[in-house]
Image (spheres, helix red, strand yellow):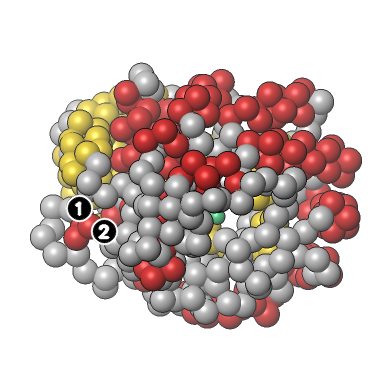
Amino acid sequence: MLALRSRRVVTPEGTRPATVVVDGERIAAVEPHDVPFERGRVEDLGELALLPGLVDTHVHLNEPGRTEWEGFSTATAAAAAGGITTLVDMPLNCIPATTSVDALTKKRRAAEGQLVVDVGFYGGVIPGNADHLEPLIDAGVLGFKAFLIESGVDELPHVGAADLRIALPKLAARGVPLLAHCELDLGAPSPSDPRRYRDYLASRPRAWEEAAIALLAELGEATGARVHVVHLACADALGLVAEARARGVKLSVETCPHYLSFEAETIPDGDPRFKCAPPIRERDQREGLWRGLREGLVDFVVSDHSPCAPALKRMAEGDVAGAWGGIAGLQLGLSATHTEASARGFSLDAIARWMCDAPARFVGLAKKGRIEPGFDADLVAFDPEARFAVDRRAILHRHDLTPYEGLTLRGAVRATWLRGERAYDARVGSWSFSRVRGRILA
Ligand SMILES: [Zn+2]
């Protein structure tokens, strides 16, 4: 047995001094801090906080098919270094897209033997694949993703309301959520200068997000399905969310560390590292997202780690309009979010709710996301006061291109345990990829 002792153990009842007793893969007990422990080894973390392992339910791992963009081994190693012990992989950017059981089988086969942390999968809803949805649920997908606008890759065409009216009742019958990319193309000016960030922002306006969320809420209401807004950038839409929930719509919302960290006003022109869709909006929207978290209208925070091969970011050209839209930041999400959250008075309890508990509940992982007896011993030793400058050399993603480069972040991951065994330790000089005990979740 192993006992992890800390002055700051972050439990569902609050942060307190405690000893977390680990028996095999599970948390056996949460005991008082100074309790004598003779059943095994005690590791005293002192003032380091002990958090539940993060559950990141929005990641693009891109393997098989676009492994040169990112892959299971590199992304799950970066996850462990970032305090994340569970990832859920999106059905697109890999080839084939996960729109059938056959494609899911190919993906699971590609993942075998490569995982440093646990990984679950989503299926995709596309026009014409309604007959594949129930078999995908039987095969263990944790939810479905659909786009209400072009997805950026040919393998996952977007759906219209008619497609969702067929798909959603099937999902509702099984209690499985639909995760929707919420932008509706209502027309907007194309960028006149491909390098200018303001032009890119204007090409995907707030109204697109609001219209898509209104449509999603309406479809959720009509079918009784659980519907979920991925990567909300537009805080103006939170009024619609509140109204829909008041009507009884099962509507949940996530946002991402980059929308909570950056603001359009200070994003430099010609720097496609900041490009994603929907775009990072103005300061008032960022502050609105923080208000949404405070009020519970935004349910959780996940990475939407979506890297690509570096050439596709068109850094040399500074071509924001032409670059791949997707931000790489998996390893840095906890520190980035804690940096901004602590500056606004939020505690580690809030971080654990947004980044561990709520996303685990969302995908039905009953044994993940809490420091509580019976839960998986997925744990993170975190130094909330440490400050560090983001250095590309420390990035374990397949590519080190990230908009966080050079920022000074607050809060550093010191060690990560996956189901009771150490998966990462910053105190060890060289990081080894040999700890591949991650499991495929279904
Ligand atoms: Zn995404």
Q: In this view, does 422 lie to the left or right of 439?
A: left
Q: Which amino acid does label 2 sit on?
A: Ile
**Outermost residue toward the left in this view:** 429
From this viewpoint, is residue 42 visible? no
From this viewpoint, is residue 409 visible? yes
Q: In this view, does 367 lie to the left or right of 187?
A: left
Instruction: Name the residue beneath numbered marker 2.
Output: 395
Residue placed at 58% from the left, 41% from the top?
202
Decide which of 146, 21 is in the foreground and name it: 146
SS assignment at label 2: loop
Image quadrant holding the C terminus, namely bottom right
Q: Quadrant of ligand 1?
A: bottom right
Instruction: Name the residue beneath numbered marker 1.
Output: 391
Residue placed at 41% from the left, 63% from the top?
313
Decide which of 258, 379 is in the foreground and name it: 258
* Horizontal and vertical percent position of residue 189: 64, 46
* Horizontal and vertical percent position of residue 422: 26, 57
Tag 1–tag 2 contact (CB < 8 Å) = yes
Q: Which amino acid does label 1 sit on?
A: Asp
Quick check: 385 above or below 25? above
Decide which of 438, 159 is in the foreground and name it: 159
- Callout 2 environment at 10 Å: few (<14), some (14 to 19), or many (20+)? many
Which of the 4 quarters of the picture holds residue 238? top right
**Outermost residue toward the front in this view:** 192
* Horizontal and vertical percent position of residue 372: 43, 37
Which of the 4 quarters of the picture holds residue 383? top left
- Callout 1 environment at 10 Å: few (<14), some (14 to 19), or many (20+)? some
Q: Note whether ligand 1 is within 8 Å of mark 1.
A: no
